Amino acid sequence: MSDYNYIEEQSYDSKIDVGIWKKIFRYALVYKKQVIIAALTMILTSGIDIAYPLFTTYAIDNFVEKGDLTGFGWFIAAYLGAIAIQGFCVYNFVKTASKLEMGISYDIRQDAYLKLQKLSFSYYDKTPVGYIMARMVSDIARLSEMIAWSVVDLFWALTYLIGVIVILFVLNWKLALIVMVVIPPLVVACIYFQKRILKNQRTVRKANSRITGAFNEGIMGAMTTKTLVREEKNSEEFVEITSEMRHASIKSIVLSHTFMPIVMLLAAVGSAIALGVGGRAVVLSAIGSVGLIGTMTYGTLSAFISYTSNFFEPIQSLARILAEFQSAQASAERVMTLIDTPCEIEDSAEVEERYGDAFDPKPENWEPITGDIKFENVSFAYKGGEKVLSNFNLDVKAGQTIALVGETGAGKSTIVNLICRFYEPTEGRILIDGRDYRERSQLWLQRSLGYVLQQPHLFSGTIRDNLAYAKKDATLEEIRAAAQMVHAEDFILRQENGYDTEVGEGGVRLSTGQKQLISFARVILANPKIFVLDEATSSIDTETEQLIQNAITTVLKNRTSFIVAHRLSTIRTADRILVIRGGKITESGTHKELLKQRGYYYDLYTTQFREEQSQGILNK
């Protein structure tokens, strides 16, 4: 089980963690005014709810019993006034709670999104996208709804419960004690059923998440499913997941429909007790006698019956709210875990003071980058893993093009990721222009980086939007110049709307080669001093590769460049080719020098050359 699944399972069954909720409620304290207004309106609403049976008591005892309508007009006015005040309170509560929910949701999402912008690559390496999306959308929505509505409902339930108990004891404390006999079993029933209903609802939610994931994988992997003939197996797995949700849903419904009759029965028992004992007291009072609970009027008896009939509502609400708190604990922990996640790569306070950070940069203090890069006894291991590099040393002069060659897992991508400061050395240091790059801000370095990945990513929007992504103020002339440099304009102008053509989500309307050309032009437009090509031509066709290859010589001129290469034909002009094996440099030199050494590079190059020659003959 992954760490994230483990956290979720633990959270579902854990008790309410006050510390977590304190952190969550800090967001509500920003809206103190709204919280106070919502709480006061609910307290006033519950007060009027408590008062309604007393209106009935007064009417029976003063108008019905006595047959005298003196003051009836004022009574009606007061009753209508109570209704109007309560209506206004409910309107105000709904309006205020809605604003509170949206405000809290907005603030938590802002903090979570800012944290995601600051987190290091290592976080995204080990955290599934679905996990992050669930935190940002459903968990935050649930928490804001919980605070805005359930917490305020708590004021109503507590006020109503306490108020009713006080009124009952004021009206007739002896009958109140007798009626209270139904409260213990009522509380037990609420707690028992709410816990079990909640448990099944959790199962339903988890199954629903798995169903959503199955839908997503089924749609995204439709082609793979068909080519591997997995339709029947996928259907069987989907039936299994949906069956789990169906069984849990049925069980939850059965529990809910069993719970309500039990609560209604206990409420009826309370009312029967009040009617039986209170009714006898009313009869005895009418004939001038005094019973076990003393004298009682018809109006007081009516109030007792009304209160005991509705007594289960606040108890049920309290049980529901506490259950929701326990259920929402998982969401609270997941959201706060995201917000409190420490950044593995952070600038020191001194560096931030001088250079600023990603959200408040101080570019006026940034020194220009020349491009000298030096590794000094660098060792690196991913968290919890074995060392990838050990005492690695490398000295690169500004403007040089360095190619990295080696087997998968040899450490090539790790080296360039360390250069970009996506990760930092476990031991040793990396110097940029003669200084440890940790003495300057991440943004100072990464603003001068151009990184082209093996799998290009385009954002929804037009080709022009994507080209200008790193330079929003770029003119059309600058955009076209960058596109022309990598020979991308030819295919762009063939599109229906040219540079204003929509690329679709992730660039689905373009081929892989076309997306890669756009990603190259995008980087060129940013005019970086350090260029990184990480297997940038391995997933494109030979024709597109040739276009890019023709542009590379011009693009990389006077820039410090690192090329992680699979196709060795693309790196023959590099100033230095490094063969990386086991995190160490085993061969170093130009293309011609390495061929003369007849080592690993020679074997790899000649093998690829023969394969390409054979493929060329077959394609004729």
Image (cartoon, rainbow, N blue to C red):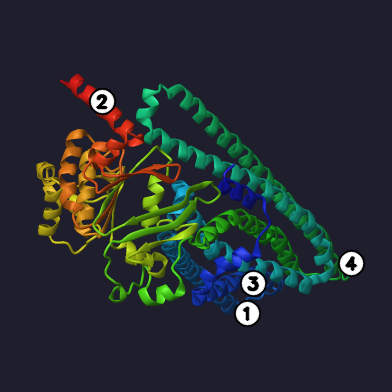
Q: Residues within 10 Å of mark 2 (few under 14, many from 20)?
A: few
Q: Is residue 334 left or right of residue 279?
A: left
Using the numbered discs, state the Cα–Cα distance from disc 4 to disc 1 in whole angstroms: 32 Å
Q: Is the Cβ of the residue at disc 4 closer than 8 Å to that at disc 2?
A: no
In the picture, the quarter occupied by the N terminus is top right
Q: Residue at x 49, y 74 (%)?
A: 31
Amino acid marked by disc 1: Thr
Question: Looking at the rendered structure, which numbered label has been put on residue 70?
Answer: 1
Q: Earlier in the sequence, mark 4 or mark 2?
A: 4
Amino acid marked by disc 2: Arg
The one of 26 and 394 positioned closer to us in this rendering: 394
Secondary element at image label 3: helix
User: From the viewer's perspective, is residue 43 above or below residue 387?
Assistant: below
Q: Earlier in the sequence, mark 2 or mark 3?
A: 3
The one of 120 and 135 positioned closer to us in this rendering: 120
Q: In this orientation, does residue 283 appear?
A: yes
Indicate the position of residue 69 as horizontal and vertical percent values: 63, 76
Q: Which residue is mark 4?
A: 291
Q: Is the Cβ of the residue at disc 3 closer than 8 Å to that at disc 4?
A: no
Q: Is the Cβ of the residue at disc 1 closer than 8 Å to that at disc 3?
A: no
User: From the viewer's perspective, is residue 75 above or below residue 534?
Assistant: below
Q: Earlier in the sequence, mark 4 or mark 1?
A: 1
Q: Residues within 10 Å of mark 4 (few under 14, many from 20)?
A: some
Secondary element at image label 2: helix
Indicate the position of residue 220 as horizontal and vertical percent values: 37, 36
